[in-house]
Image (spheres, rainbow, N blue to C red):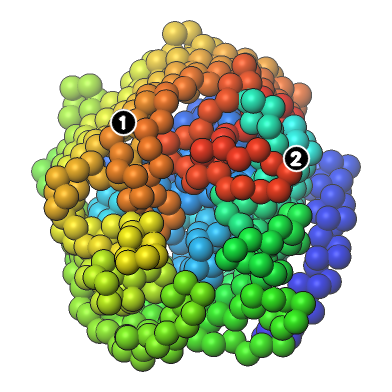
């Protein structure tokens, strides 16, 4: 597998820039091919031409089309595409690979599936959250389910579940469908995306390529931020659809990239992913059994970071020589579900899923004398979990629904680290070769009701999730006691959350509100700069916490062609154990937009206003970032316009941060000292950014 993948990777790397460009050109000049199947969602016409804030369209559900242009211009990675959804924030580290946070909950509290698969990053310093391996335009749909209100998307989703999905429709006659986009922007930003689907009723093939590149961006003060990146991906799928009800698909993905980081002493020079997946779906006409779905996958992530390839080498106390670290992670998994029905009123999905991953590390403090390539990889941890789950929907009366779910997970983890680094020395790991087993539960119940008056939909649900600590929480930190060098025995986090809200939709007005209150027992708090004798270290602590808040969105059509939109998001957290604010909480955020849309033309404006945050605890947070102090509020204005000369061609352009405002998000990493760059308290956001995007579909 790996030898073949390396060969293909090398070939792809050399042709990718040309390949994507050629594909895009082909799409421009192609004669119009028969388009018997289309993946364009039927709701696309109703949505914004340029997406600025996807709306909640069903209880706790947000669905957005990643192929649509969006403002502000996101990096071509998963996190920046989520940031537009009210309630999401991104912890910025540089130009790309930020960490998505929902309602102040970071990392593995937001479950992420790519094509139904779990992909876990390799970097112990969290350079590569799962979203770093997402190339959003290669997917057809991003689905977000807020809160612990599903059990179908894997374990531990205490804050939300996010799924990047592809959906290739069966071809009713031989044909081809292609989409592509070309984007150019400030700071040398260029993106190329091509997606080609060819098929007959019996078989289909899909080829998708993406490439995104950016130089360092400049913040509103005119200072360059060490943030350049290059990312590319290639996906291929081969499907067999002998009839309307059956699909067997073999798929594969290869991707890689490099990224400069403004918040640390190293950069990512390799983010390679090799992936193979196999999926089978069949709809059945049984009395009770309505369909089955089976999936198996393999993901290998190989990451390299160093302190010299993307920056001027500057010796420091901790890294006097050229240093390289090369972690990798191999994740395998599978899932089987069956859809059941019991009469007209009861439907259910039951299933099992499993996932196993192994992490290794090799690193050198002196690449010149001891190159890392010559070293053996040493396993430092392995994890396994198997879950059984079931979700049931029951029609209650003419307009009500009860949805309930339950899942049980069996967890296993092993600490394979023989030695731990303490300062500049190595000491034996007190939890070396220790193993942990745990059985954890998750479940929820929700009532939804459509009210004729309005029409309104109201909902309320209670959910509970027990989350097993992740790799970073267990193996990247110590404990608070003087002798506690390993946090391998950190307790699982238990979240109980109430989710409630309403949706309203009429011809001129639509709005939604969702609110939550959450109690977290044994919240896994990460604390940096924790004093232990003469040295300072990072520790994992279990504390009790509570959070509450919510999101609102609304759209009002003043005229058929003129719409006003607005969103609001707020989260407040409290660390009950320390009687202090819970760290890494985003401040109040509001967006106001207006959109003017005609048959061929559109124009829009977006005002994003974020309040100051004075609830903070310095050095406390999560595996991604800790609070740095209070932050000021800011307001950013952006403008966009669109032109659709004919069906299948859309040209959009925008100016983000029109007034070149200098600002940083509250959730941001601290700026590091990088030779040749100005050091800032936080990593500042981009200044004025111009962009132009061409979308094509055939
Ligand atoms: Cu790294």
Camera-near label (1 vs 2) is: 1
Circle 1 residue: 614
Residue found at the very far top of the displayed protein: 559
68 and 686: which is toward the camera: 686
- Residue 189's mark? 2
The residue positioned 47% from the left and 72% from the top of the image is 423
Residue found at the very far front of the displayed protein: 534
- Look at the picture and state if 43 lies above or below 233: above
Query: CB under 8 Å between callouts 1 and 2?
Result: no
Q: Is residue 140 left or right of residue 411?
A: right
The residue positioned 27% from the left and 77% from the top of the image is 483
Instruction: Tell me residue 150's x, y (percent).
Output: 28, 57
Q: Badge 2: few (under 14), some or many (20 or more) residues near its Cα, within 10 Å?
A: many
The residue positioned 71% from the left and 22% from the top of the image is 643
- Quadrant containing the C terminus is top right
Please tell me whether mark 1 sits on a helix, a strand or a loop.
Answer: loop
Q: Quadrant of residue 128?
A: bottom right
- Residue 649's mark? none
Q: Is residue 577 left or right of residue 600?
A: left
The residue positioned 70% from the left and 36% from the top of the image is 224
> Marks 1 and 2, how far apart in space?
35 Å
Viewer can see residue 405: no
Instruction: Tell me residue 432's x, y (percent).
Output: 36, 89
Instruction: Tell me residue 66's x, y (percent).
Output: 57, 44
Mark nearer the N terminus (1 vs 2) = 2
Q: Quadrant of residue 62?
A: top left
Viewer can see residue 614: yes
- Quadrant containing the N terminus is bottom right
398 and 12: which is toward the camera: 12
Please tell me whether mark 2 sits on a helix, a strand or a loop.
Answer: strand
355 and 171: which is toward the camera: 355
């Amino acid at each position: 597998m790996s030898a073949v993948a390396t060969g293909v990777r090398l070939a792809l790397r050399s042709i990718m820039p040309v390949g994507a460009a050629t594909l895009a050109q082909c799409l421009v000049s192609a004669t119009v091919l028969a388009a018997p199947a289309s993946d364009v969602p039927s709701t696309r016409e109703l949505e914004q031409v340029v997406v600025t804030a996807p709306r909640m369209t069903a209880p706790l559900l947000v669905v957005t089309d990643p192929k649509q242009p969006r403002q502000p211009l996101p990096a071509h990675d998963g996190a920046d595409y989520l940031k537009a959804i009210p309630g999401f924030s991104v912890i910025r580290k540089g130009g790309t690979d930020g960490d998505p946070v929902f309602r102040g909950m970071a990392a593995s509290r937001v479950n992420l599936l790519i094509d139904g698969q779990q992909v876990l990053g390799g970097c112990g310093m969290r350079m590569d959250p799962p979203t770093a391996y997402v190339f959003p335009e290669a997917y057809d749909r991003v689905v977000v389910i807020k809160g612990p209100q599903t059990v179908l998307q894997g374990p531990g989703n205490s804050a939300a579940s996010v799924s990047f999905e592809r959906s290739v429709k069966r071809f009713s006659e031989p044909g081809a469908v292609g989409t592509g986009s070309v984007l150019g922007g400030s700071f040398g930003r260029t993106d190329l995306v091509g997606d080609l689907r060819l098929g007959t009723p019996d078989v289909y093939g899909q080829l998708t390529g993406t490439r995104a590149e950016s130089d360092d961006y400049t913040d509103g003060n005119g200072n360059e931020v060490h943030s350049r990146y290059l990312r590319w991906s290639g996906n291929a799928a081969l499907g067999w659809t002998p009839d309307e009800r059956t699909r067997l698909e073999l798929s594969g993905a290869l991707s890689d990239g490099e990224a400069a980081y403004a918040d640390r002493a190293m950069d990512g020079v390799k983010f390679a992913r090799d992936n193979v997946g196999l999926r089978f779906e069949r709809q059945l006409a049984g009395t009770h059994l309505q369909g089955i779905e089976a999936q198996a996958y393999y993901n290998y992530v190989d990451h390299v970071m160093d302190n010299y390839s993307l920056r001027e080498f500057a010796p420091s106390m901790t890294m006097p020589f050229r240093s390289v670290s090369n972690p990798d992670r191999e994740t395998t998994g599978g899932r089987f579900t069956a859809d059941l029905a019991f009469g007209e009123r009861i439907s259910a999905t039951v299933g099992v899923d499993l996932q196993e991953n192994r992490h290794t590390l090799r690193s050198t403090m002196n690449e010149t004398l001891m190159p890392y390539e010559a070293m053996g990889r040493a396993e430092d941890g392995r994890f396994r979990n198997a879950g059984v789950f079931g979700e049931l929907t029951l029609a209650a009366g003419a307009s009500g629904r009860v949805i309930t779910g339950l899942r049980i997970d069996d967890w296993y983890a092993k600490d394979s680290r023989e030695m731990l680094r303490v300062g500049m020395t190595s000491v034996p790991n007190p939890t070396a070769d220790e193993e942990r087993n745990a059985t954890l539960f998750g479940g929820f119940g929700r009532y939804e009701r459509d009210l004729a008056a309005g029409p309104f939909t109201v909902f309320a649900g209670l959910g509970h999730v027990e989350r097993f600590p992740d790799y970073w929480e267990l193996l990247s930190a110590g404990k608070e006691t003087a002798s506690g060098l390993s946090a391998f025995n950190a307790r699982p986090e238990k979240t109980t959350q109430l989710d409630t809200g309403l949706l309203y939709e009429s011809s001129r007005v639509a709005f939604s509100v969702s609110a939550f209150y959450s109690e977290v027992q044994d919240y896994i708090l990460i604390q940096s700069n924790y004093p232990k004798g003469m040295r300072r270290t990072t520790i994992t602590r279990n504390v009790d916490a509570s959070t509450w808040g919510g999101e609102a969105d609304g759209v009002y059509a003043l005229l058929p062609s003129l719409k006003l939109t607005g969103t609001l998001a707020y989260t407040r957290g409290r660390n009950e154990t320390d009687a202090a604010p819970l760290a890494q909480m985003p401040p109040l955020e509001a967006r106001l937009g207006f959109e003017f849309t005609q048959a061929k033309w559109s124009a829009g404006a977006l005002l994003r206003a974020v309040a100051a945050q004075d609830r903070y605890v310095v050095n406390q947070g999560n595996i991604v970032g800790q609070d740095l102090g209070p932050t000021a509020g800011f307001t950013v204005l952006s403008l966009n316009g669109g032109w659709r000369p004919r069906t299948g061609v859309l040209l959009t352009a925008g100016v983000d941060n029109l007034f070149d405002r200098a600002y940083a998000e509250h959730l941001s990493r601290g700026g590091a000292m990088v030779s040749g760059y100005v050091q800032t308290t936080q990593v500042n956001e981009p200044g004025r950014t111009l962009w132009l995007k061409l979308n094509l579909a055939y």
